[in-house]
Image (spheres, rainbow, N blue to C red):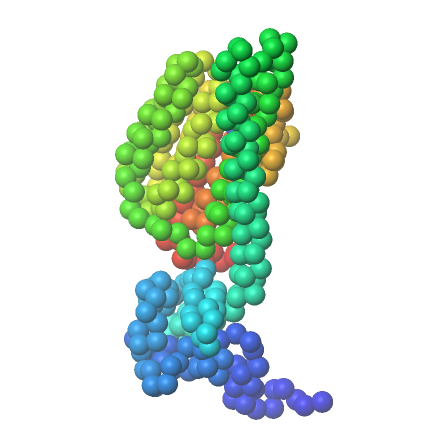
Amino acid sequence: MTNLSSNSIDLNTTLLESTHDAILAVDKLLNLNLSNTQFNKKFIKGVEHKHIEEIFEDQEVITAFKDCIKTSESRKVQEHSIFHKNRTHYYEIVVSPIIRNEQCIGAMGVFKNITEAKLTEQMRVDFVANVSHEIRTPLTSIKGFAQVLDSNDKFIAPEAKHYLDKIITNTERLHALFSDLLNLSVIESRHRLLKKEVNLKFMLESVKAMLLQNYADKNMNISYDLSVEFVRVDPKLFEQALINLIENACKYSGNDANIKISNFIDNEESVIITISDDGPGISKEHLGRIFERFYQVDSSRNKKHDSTGTGLGLSIVKHIIAKHKGVIWAESEPDQGTIFFIKLPINPNKIDQND
Ligand code: ADP
């Protein structure tokens, strides 16, 4: 057997060349120091590049290297795509600091090819999206015709009205279910968020106006108290998460309920947003499961409050928050209301030491 440790320089080169990952190392000024053949084949286009900014146009990649060197902490780029030999290749990049004598002297990037996984995932998402879309179209038509029948007493005998109402309600449930499934698969497949600085106050005002109108008969009181006004999020997705959480608070709390939204900075590293209500609460046995797909605490509670609940609302929220590299959890006791906590990192590309 060959002794792997006989020549350490040879061994290092052999290891670098044996891996399927593309690897490069840069010094503190981001000058290229070392790269393996996998990297050169895919990322170097003819001319000899000396600086990382000559290789990558993607600012997220450049920022990951800069941040890593500045903070001596690892960074991750979830998805970086390149066009090579007539097809798109996808990479996940982990950038780690190179430390010598307790000083950061550069950074090393490991580029893992995730193209296969990405394409399989895309096929699954496309399938769910197509099925959901195809099913929603005839459902809309069934509901439309049922409503036409319902609107005119001439069309339908009084004894049949009860069955017609059931058709309409169940069509609405199916429509909501397929819309949520479609939403979920689209969110799951999104690797790149369209993040912007968003004024949370404006966003909450519009969510509040919509929900107060939808739940006008319940006389809800929705208020907010923000210590951080701006958050960096994907506005469409994040608004969807807030709608789902605040709408649940409206749906499951009784009349005259108080729903409060607040936020604060935690440890200078994250923003925590809380959504609390004084509704029926959730017991311990259910609390750990409410973010699972299709999980509903008890179907009678859901039927009482809303016939179109799908059990997917919180699962959608969890995915949206995870896409922002955040976490969500809830605290609750029966009859004591519920508080949802969203924790968003201020620097989302940072890799947790426990990752
Ligand atoms: P659904 O479509 O049934 O509302 P969700 O995924 O949004 O599904 O919620 C899962 C379950 O968690 C709900 O069925 C409901 O019983 C419970 N739940 C969610 N939010 C609250 C809340 N604010 N207060 C009490 N129960 C809640």
In the displayed structure, would residue 34 be above or below residue 350? below
Left or right: 238, with 8 as reference point? left
Q: Position of residue 112 (x, y in %)?
A: 51, 69
Q: In which quarter of the image is residue 3?
A: bottom right
Q: Which of 170 and 251 is in front in this view?
A: 170
Q: Quadrant of residue 61?
A: bottom left
In the displayed structure, would residue 334 be above or below residue 185? above
Q: Where is residue 110 in the image (x, y as percent from the top left)?
A: 48, 71
Left or right: 205, with 337 as reference point? left
Q: Which residue lies furthest to the front in this view?
A: 154
Left or right: 199, with 117 as reference point? left
Residue depicted at x 46% and y 33%: 244
Res. 318 visible in picture: no
Q: How many dots with numbers?
A: 0
Q: Residue furthest top?
A: 158
Left or right: 142, with 269 as reference point? right
Residue depicted at x 34% and y 50%: 195
Q: Where is residue 211 in the image (x, y as percent from the top left)?
A: 39, 25
Quarter holding the N terminus is: bottom right
Q: Quadrant of residue 224?
A: top left
Q: Position of residue 210 (x, y in %)?
A: 36, 26
Q: Nearer the viewer, residue 8 or 63?
A: 63
Q: Which of 140 and 183 is in front in this view?
A: 140
Residue depicted at x 45% and y 55%: 191
Residue depicted at x 33% and y 82%: 49
In the displayed structure, would residue 317 be above or below residue 166? below
